[in-house]
Amino acid sequence: MLRPKTRIVVINDTTGVYMQPDFYDPYTDTFYEVKSYPLRKDEYMFKRLCYQIKLYQLAYPKSKAAVGFGNGYGYELLELPSLTPRDRLQLLKEIVEATKSIEIQEEEEVAVVLNKGETVFYSYRLNT
């Protein structure tokens, strides 16, 4: 497995979010997020992890998503379902809303980030 390059999801050419899961398997087109502690015992942390995976699914829209986490005896692997179009739209709206109060960087800084070889530019359009 490889350490994937950072990707950025850009929404309406104004909002961007960086994402980088722990590992990516190009042969199975699956990305992995790994935690060393048992998340199923903590409902709040498990929900946070699932939300984190949904964010990664925006950057890796065709990939399968899997989570590995400690279960006391080794690691448990959990494959998560793909985002539905409704889930994707809701998540994009949440990102836009969450970033409304963040100070916008200068265009030159944004161009430098997008032109680094480490990021992939994605654009999802919202009717807002």
Image (spheres, rainbow, N blue to C red):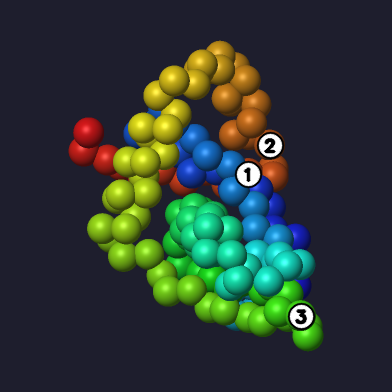
Q: Are marks 3 and 2 in contact (CB under 8 Å)?
A: no
**Residue situated in front as seen by the camera: 74 or 43:** 43
Q: Are marks 2 and 1 in contact (CB under 8 Å)?
A: yes
Indicate the quadrant containing the C terminus: top left, top right, bottom left or bottom right. Answer: top left
Q: Taking the image as drawn, is residue 67 in sight? A: yes
Say which element carries label 3: loop
Marks 3 and 2, how far apart in space?
40 Å
- Lateral position of residue 81 relative to residue 59, left or right: left
Q: Earlier in the sequence, mark 3 or mark 2?
A: 3
Q: Which residue is mark 3?
A: 72
Residue 27 vs 58, above or below: the answer is: below
Indicate the quadrant containing the N terminus: top left, top right, bottom left or bottom right. Answer: bottom right
Q: Which residue is mark 2?
A: 116
Three-letter code for the amino acid on which mark 3 is drawn: Gly
Three-letter code for the amino acid on which mark 1 is drawn: Thr
**Residue situated in front as seen by the camera: 41 or 77:** 41
Q: Which residue is mark 1?
A: 119
For the point 64% across and 52% down, which residue is it? 20
Q: Position of residue 35 (x, y in %)?
A: 71, 65
Q: Which label belongs to residue 59? A: none
Residue 121 vs 102, above or below: the answer is: below
**Residue situated in front as seen by the camera: 62 or 45:** 45
For the point 21% across and 38% down, which residue is it? 127
Marks 1 and 3, how far apart in space?
36 Å
- Lateral position of residue 124 relative to residue 43, left or right: left
Say which element carries label 2: loop
For the point 58% across and 25% down, which residue is it? 111
Q: Taking the image as drawn, is residue 24 in sight? A: no
